Image (cartoon, coloured by chain):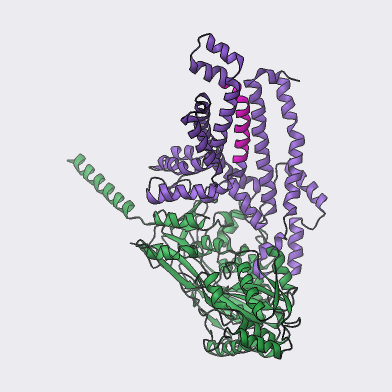
Amino acid sequence: MKSKLLAATAGLALALGCAHAASAKTLVYCSEGSPENFYPAINTTGTTFDASAEQIYDRLMQFTRGTTNVEPGLAQSYDVSNDGKTFTFHLRHGVKWQTTKTFTPTRDFNADDVIFSFDRQWKPDDPYYKVTSDNHSYFNDMGFNKLLKSITKVDDYTVKFELNQAEAPFIADLAMAFASITSKEYADNMMKAGTPEKVDQDPVGTGPFIMVQYQKDSTIHYKANPTYFRGKSKIDDLVFAITPDVSVRLQKLKANECQVMPYPNPADLDTIRKDPNLKLLEQPGMNIGYLAFQTQKKPFTDKRVRQAINMAINKKAIIDAVYLGAGVVAKNPIPPVMWSYNDAVKDYPYDPAAAKKLLAEAGYPNGFETDLWAMPVQRPYNPNARRIAELMQADLAKVGIKAEIKSYEWGEYRKRAQNGEHQMAQLGWTGDNGDPDNFLHVLLGCDATNGGSNIAKWCYKPFDDLVVQAEHVTDINERTKLYKQAQVIFKEEAPWVTIAHSIQFAAVRKNVEDFKLSPFGSHIFYGVDLK
Amino acid sequence: MLRFVLTRVSLIIPTFLGVTLLAFLLVHLIPGDPIETMAGEHGIDPARHAQLRAEYGFDKPLLVQYGIYIGHVLRGDLGISAITHQRVTEEFFSLFPATVELTICAMLFAVLLGLPAGIIAAVRRNTIFDHGIMGISLTGYSMPIFWWGLLLILLFSGVLGWTPVSGRVDAAIFVDTHTGFLLIDSLLSDEDGAFRSAVSHLILPTIVLGTVPLAIIARMTRSAMLEVLGEDYIRTARAKGLSPVWVVCVHALRNALIPVITVIGLQMGSLFAGAILTETIFSWPGVGHWVVEAINRRDYPVLQGGVLMLGSVVMLVNLIVDLLYGVVNPRIRHTR
């Protein structure tokens, strides 16, 4: 009797175990490349952020999935002082650090972790400042090194950030990957053990997935964090299968060896749409591809010349021939997905006759000679700059402008463009934080003309006043009004030809539910389910 | 024999130094500033740029950089990757087993098919077997790897579903790394189906990588065999009444092997270093792909270290080939 009972119990346990194993959901993501490491603050690529920040870590603020809207993350709320310079964050209670093979936490997330995460990037005398690398790119690029005055712990669940000046995009900046919160306790343990670099190789976060194993250039295995503060992920096991070749990624998706693939080839989009087992997701990218005039060199000092060239270029033909439909014609310097996008702005029509007339008015009835720079590499906002340059060259020839196409090695190209060595140069930008300031001020502000990202060297006070004012105002309606006015001025003054905003795509199997494309190009798997 | 071995080994030293110089200089000939490349559209402020150049040692004269580099190399330190910040030697040895595994399988495939094919073509000269084998080998030699690989994936993985598309093992299977050789690690693992998955993932990349060496080995074996089969001692062996198989496989093949061993050695060396396209198509995490990515990212330490390590592997393989000559042909090991 006893043995029969034991057998029955064992049988039931086995059945339950099998049922659980059978129902364990594994999602395989065909990632396009390998992460550099698992510490977001010293990296700049989306590939690394996907593997680290988006799955393993959280931030004080976060972007609502699929949007650029900012919502509370590890901070459940915050207060701002009247002068806009002091932010007090009230942290969530009961957020657990992940338990891994190298770390078992003895306490929950608290203010010490927030201060550690920022001090590590900010203070050169912090013991972790140089661990793995001291190149905290985004912390510096977003101006945090100059912006932050102090970060103080008020109590275990309250942290105060004091800034040197009011900065409206600050809250959105805190949702970026570089601002991921890491465990001070884990860092202290690893420093004591003499292996501080392990914190960046065997990461510990508060996020929805725990990294189990990384096999270099091959796979990354994650498992769902059972104690995640927003609730355990619907997916139990997540695997990144690193697959650099785009055609192979599609084959793997079709064979169900992976269930999500990013960056399909534009030539394959129709195939994906027609496949009954696949879904094609699309999202306008938060980017802009443009042709900048060097507005401090003749003839581009004359607004009429810039406007004429805007009318001479057939942008639709470029979208069709080069973007293969994976792009929309741009009329503004910010993409439509961004708040404060001014849809009322009218783009210049493609009108070579009007262009010629305007050139004649400006004193160039027979056109002129110029250079036209093309990037040597594919960028998210520009799939083939060389080809675009050739199309533009042909368009410009019709209005009498002889353009010589030039290119340099990528690092060299960007440096020379930043130095203003060009007459006309293609470039672009992908947004970092969903804030219009990140485009309008960074790319077109007066303080960015000297060594900054304003390669048009365009400094126009009415425009600059608007964007500088908008940076310091916290009311979003007021900021929206200012940015909309700025876009009108931009269109009139035409320091660029705005070419296109590329559309980003992803392909998923039909049984993948609720995968949302991010305007930032991130691939987030919390909230995704498999039916 | 010992003198022969010592002579061959001593020649490695100047070759190795030459490879270090070449690895160092070639990398610095690549256009572009690595710091600027890392910065991308965001750019980098001049002070920070200067600081990073000093940190990486790029601000020193080339000769000084080379001197520092050689000093580190002789201590076994190939530096730290500018991108991943991991030790170059650690990265190399974590990826090299995958390349070795694939290369060995590809060469076994090439030798086990190519040698018999070449022998048959030589023995049945000017028959349909000869023309067929040589025709197929010429086709195999001419096909671009990228095209051939994608074609096999489309057919066997896409249409027929007989083989997996890419990778070393099913993504959902978890195999702990002990040796880095997945065939061994999967046997040691207690995951169901791991070994079968590892074998099935090897099939297509082995065929793709092994196709060109197979073609070359088949053609070289045929040529060498034809030359040897025309010799007097072969006619004597036949006249003595020895079986045709014995004549071909023992007397003729042994003498025909010298040039074939040369080709196998050279192919092996180039496969270790150049499985880049196969690794990319099949998402095979080997050193070829690692080195190419380092070029794109201007990761100088990885580029220098990778070229040096792969050059060392090729030297080692050539040394083994040289030593094998002595085993196969006693006249060589007794030559001054």
Query: What is the tally of numbered marks visible in this picture?
Result: 0
**Which residue occupies the extreme top position in the image?**
B240
Image x and y of residue B226, in percent: 57, 24
Chain A drawing hue: green
Q: Position of residue A214 (x, y in %)?
A: 52, 52
Which stretch is magenta? Answer: B253-271
Residue B220 to residue B146: above or below? above
Q: Quadrant of the N terminus of chain B?
A: top right
Expressed as whole percent of the image width and height from the top left, the position of residue B82 reads 67, 56
Q: Is residue B297 something that shows in the picture?
A: yes
- Image x and y of residue A91, in percent: 51, 73
User: Does B254 lie within the magenta span?
Assistant: yes
Q: Answer above or below: position of B160 versus A432.
A: above
- The quarter holding residue A359 reads bottom right
Q: Which residue sits furthest left?
A: A1
Residue situated in front as seen by the camera: A185 or B231? B231
Rendered residue at 43%/63% (across/down): A507
Name the residue furthest front: B126
| Residue at (58% x, 57% y) in the render | A37
In the rendered image of this protein, does residue A101 appear above or below residue A489?
above
Quarter of the image for the C terminus of chain B: give it.
Answer: top right
Chain identity for the colour purple used in the image = B
Is B207 located above or below residue A230 in the figure? above
Q: Magenta residues: mostly which secondary structure?
A: helix
| Residue situated in front as seen by the camera: B264 or A132 | B264
Q: Left or right? Give the position of B126 relative to A363.
A: left
Q: Is residue A85 left or right of residue A110?
A: right
Asked if residue B282 shows in the view, the reply is no
Nearer to the camera, B176 or A76: B176
Q: Is residue A62 left or right of residue A234?
A: right
Query: Which residue sits at x=24%, y=48%?
Result: A12
Whether B225 is among the magenta residues is no
